[in-house]
Amino acid sequence: MTKFSDLKLGPKVQKAIDEAGYTEPTPIQAQAIPAALEGRDVLGIAQTGTGKTASFTLPMITQLARGRAKARMPRSLVLAPTRELAAQVAENFDTYSKHVRLTKALLIGGVSFKEQDQLIDKGVDVLIATPGRLLDHFERGKLLLTDVKIMVVDEADRMLDMGFIPDIERIFSLVPFTRQTLFFSATMAPEIERITNTFLSNPHRVEVARQASASETIEQGVAMFRPSRKDRAASEKRKLLRQLIDAEGDKLTNAIIFCNRKSDVDIVAKSLTKYGHECAPIHGDLDQSVRTRTLDGFRAGNLRILVASDVAARGLDVPSVSHVFNFDVPGHAEDYVHRIGRTGRAGRDGKAITLCQPSDEKNLEDVERLLQKEIPRLDTGAAPAPAEPEALKADAEETPKPRRTRSRSRKPAAEAKADAPVATEAPAAEAPKPEATPEPTPAPQTEPVAAAEADKPQERSRGGRNRRGGSGGGRRDGSNGGNGAQVVGMGDHMPTFIEKSFEERMDG
């Protein structure tokens, strides 16, 4: 059996490992560390929770122990897809480099640029960053990457999912061609394969498990869920989740619940809190200080349940997570492997339970196809009984009401019904019964004038009334209003000056 003492790490690094209580490396560590110490490029493929972080931090510290960084020119670069994973890598460096004089800087979003600039200006040996924040510093002229000797890309398949591949390719073009590259991923999608063929030089390939396989120490199960009514699906699904949590009893020391949507993360966390569970949400829309405080509380045991989006699915090292619940079947089958990989770490036993409703069955088939096995179905008894009225009321408070767009000004049905008689019957009561009136005799007019008047468009304002105050062309006094009679020409009210003007024109 290989031991850390056989890997030819530096004596100060070996001392830090002994103090941390580690004696035997994991399979990927045993294969990747010797090749990295030789200066070779390394392509590591392993499932999450196998110790990939130490596979590159330990040889990097050993190699960087000699030398000194220049201002704004880091000697090594580690790229991570999320803030939490980057922070975890920084913690690993602190653990293993405490006897070596190395400086580091963590460049992630949610932290002041000024504080990060001050660290970079002093010169850092190890720069740990997310791709977006790294390029922000570079474009501001605060960072030079021409002295990078070791470059690490961690969780490369997650980079692909988050759309960071163009940023990764640009960063590769900014670092020296002679750098050493350590590239780690849990899966090897075609795009990842293309990048490794382009930017890695004759890499030492380490693959310790079948791609996208789940740890054998994790007990998996699926709870099939069919709601009694479509409008109660969300509340009944949350009720089933609470039943599954309660059924685990004392075996559930702590758990992570994954949701596909950020809005569901907040709703599920609020629901569990209302029913007496110690939990908190974490997702990308929360402030970085809140996310850090929540994770620290979960690691310290102050929080029993963490409700998370996929921001926590990759790389977060909380060794003692006993359970993982998938509130939704993930849309990408690979994400299932990373989610359940939060439990059963470092050889411990773990349990993963997934809730699956009819609309998720296709995604479940994709997961089972990737795992090349069927996930056992759990016996949850009959379908969840309809919630009691009080429970429905509580769930209604947790679920945000859908935003109405087209019917903002509509009154409630009860009010509309009450208003209807007033709107329709009142005018009918006031309107006099129409009487038959003889057709008016048109005033004598010449043919051209009648034609001209007939061709004039009627001036109408809002509500179909003309601007003179009548309805339908009636007289000002209303004598012809509403009876359908048509006045030809100007009737008996033609002004004298118009008649005179007309006669003069005819005589001329």
Image (cartoon, grey):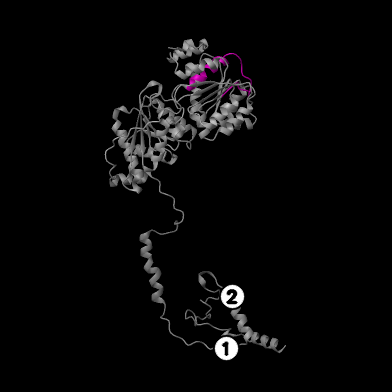
Q: Quadrant of residue 215?
A: top left
Say whether residue 298 is left or right of residue 90.
Answer: left
Q: Which residue is mark 2?
A: 457
In this rendered view, identify the residue nearer to me: 40 or 7.
Answer: 40
Say whether residue 507 is left or right of residue 33.
Answer: right
Q: Position of residue 244 (x, y in %)?
A: 31, 35
> Which amino acid is tagged 2?
Pro
In this rendered view, identify the residue nearer to me: 189 or 464.
Answer: 189
In this rendered view, identify the residue nearer to me: 456 or 477.
Answer: 456
Residue 110: in sight, yes or no?
A: no
Q: Secondary structure at mark 2?
A: loop
In this rendered view, identify the residue nearer to me: 173 or 98.
Answer: 173
Above or below: residue 238 compared with residue 249: below
Q: Is residue 55 magenta?
A: yes
Q: Quadrant of residue 25?
A: top left
Above or below: residue 285 compared with residue 107: below
Residue that appears at 44% across and 50% down: 403
Q: Secondary structure at mark 1?
A: loop
Q: Which residues are magenta?
A: 52-77
Q: Which residue is mark 1?
A: 443
Q: Position of residue 378 (x, y in %)?
A: 31, 34
> What quarter of the picture does the C terminus occupy?
bottom right
**Labels 1 and 2 touching (C-beta < 8 A):** no
Q: Position of residue 42 (x, y in %)?
A: 54, 21
N-terminal-most mark, 1 or 2: 1
Above or below: residue 404 compared with residue 277: below
Above or below: residue 153 compared with residue 497: above
